[in-house]
């Protein structure tokens, strides 16, 4: 059996504008996805995907070498997976050319959390097929690709989009006030693709990109939480103006003592809360059950 692993991800800065070349700060998560492949002397590929609770949420079988769908529990999902596998064979003609087998994938985080169920899949398939993951992404889900950089990173990173050869640099992000940082799941699953399609690209000019780049650099240098909070709110204001949306703190958490920043597609998934020792109880009292301290979310080698 061959086994492959990729980390989940969180984008701390430059959501949306990363698509136009802004320098983003991103972090790999402790939780990720496993892909196990067992070769078998057959012209069929059997696929099973398991969730956090070890329940099989998707299954399919494909004919080889065409990747035609024989059966599936979700036709749209099977079609997308078939297209990804076909794309992999175009990069590596030896991939699954001689035999099939069985694939089992295992998610370590809730599928609804938006931590990268798609990106970890792309990353694992790319590792398995020995192909460029950014090409696979471009030909399937689309997006900036920062999540693929996180998938195989063991530390925070800077990410700058550059088609299928992005610039990825180590970013020593380790704020001294990290015990007061929390990730809160808003329980509103967002579609990154839908968010991208709704963008007004004409507003995403060099001025906003330069501004976000400057904030990212200052966040990296920040050692005082008050200054960090100011930068988070400045980032929220800038992206809010771009999207013509009200930042989440002004909408739902006006009484929060600290700063709140959206992560990824606005309106759902996780937010970053920079607060204090009362932050956990604040969100719990408001009915948010998933509140993870920084140390529990971020991958540490």
Image: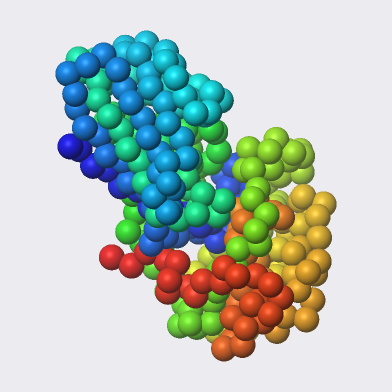
Side of 65 relative to 270 (left or right) = left
For the image, the number of numbered tags is 0
Instruction: Give percent across and percent down for residue 11.
Output: 53, 56
Colour scheme used in the picture? rainbow
Side of 95 relative to 118 (left or right) = left
* Vertical relation: 271 (above or below) 43: below
233 and 216: which is toward the camera: 233
* Vertical relation: 290 (above or below) 28: below
**What's the residue at 48%, 73% (across, down)?**
294
Instruction: Give percent across and percent down for residue 118.
Output: 48, 40
As drawn, the residue found furthest toward the bottom would be: 277
Observer able to see residue 192 = yes
**What's the residue at 58%, 47% (across, down)?**
18
**What's the residue at 78%, 81% (across, down)?**
255
Instruction: Give percent across and percent down for residue 208.
Output: 70, 52
18 and 299: which is toward the camera: 299
Residue 229, image quadrant: bottom right
**What's the residue at 54%, 23% (across, down)?**
75
212 and 10: which is toward the camera: 10
The C terminus: image quadrant:
bottom left
The N terminus: image quadrant:
top left
Observer able to see residue 93 = no
Instruction: Give percent across and percent down for residue 212.
Output: 63, 58
């Amino acid at each position: 059996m061959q086994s492959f692993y990729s980390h989940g991800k969180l984008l701390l800065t430059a959501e949306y504008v990363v698509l136009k070349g802004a320098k983003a700060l991103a972090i790999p998560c402790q939780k990720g996805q496993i892909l196990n492949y067992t070769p078998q002397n057959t012209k069929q590929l059997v696929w099973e995907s398991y969730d956090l609770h070890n329940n099989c949420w998707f299954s399919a079988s494909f004919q080889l070498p065409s990747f035609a769908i024989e059966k599936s529990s979700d036709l749209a999902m099977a079609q997308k997976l078939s297209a990804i596998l076909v794309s992999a064979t175009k990069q590596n003609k030896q991939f699954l050319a001689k035999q099939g087998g069985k694939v089992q994938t295992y998610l370590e985080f809730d599928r609804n959390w938006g931590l990268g169920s798609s990106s970890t899949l792309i990353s694992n398939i790319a590792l398995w097929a020995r192909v460029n993951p950014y090409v696979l992404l471009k030909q399937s889900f689309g997006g900036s690709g920062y999540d693929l950089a996180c998938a195989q990173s063991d530390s925070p990173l800077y990410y700058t989009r550059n088609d299928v050869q992005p610039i990825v640099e180590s970013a020593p992000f380790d704020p001294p006030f990290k015990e007061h940082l929390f990730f809160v799941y808003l329980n509103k699953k967002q579609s990154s693709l839908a968010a991208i399609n709704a963008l007004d690209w004409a507003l995403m000019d060099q001025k906003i990109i330069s501004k976000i780049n400057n904030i990212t650099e200052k966040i990296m240098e920040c050692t005082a939480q008050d200054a960090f909070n100011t930068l988070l709110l400045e980032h929220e204001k800038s992206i809010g103006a771009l999207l013509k949306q009200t930042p989440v703190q002004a909408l739902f958490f006006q009484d929060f003592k600290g700063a709140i920043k959206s992560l990824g597609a606005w309106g759902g998934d996780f937010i970053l809360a920079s607060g204090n020792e009362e932050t956990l109880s604040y969100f719990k009292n408001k009915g948010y059950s998933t509140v993870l301290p920084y140390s529990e979310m971020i991958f540490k080698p």
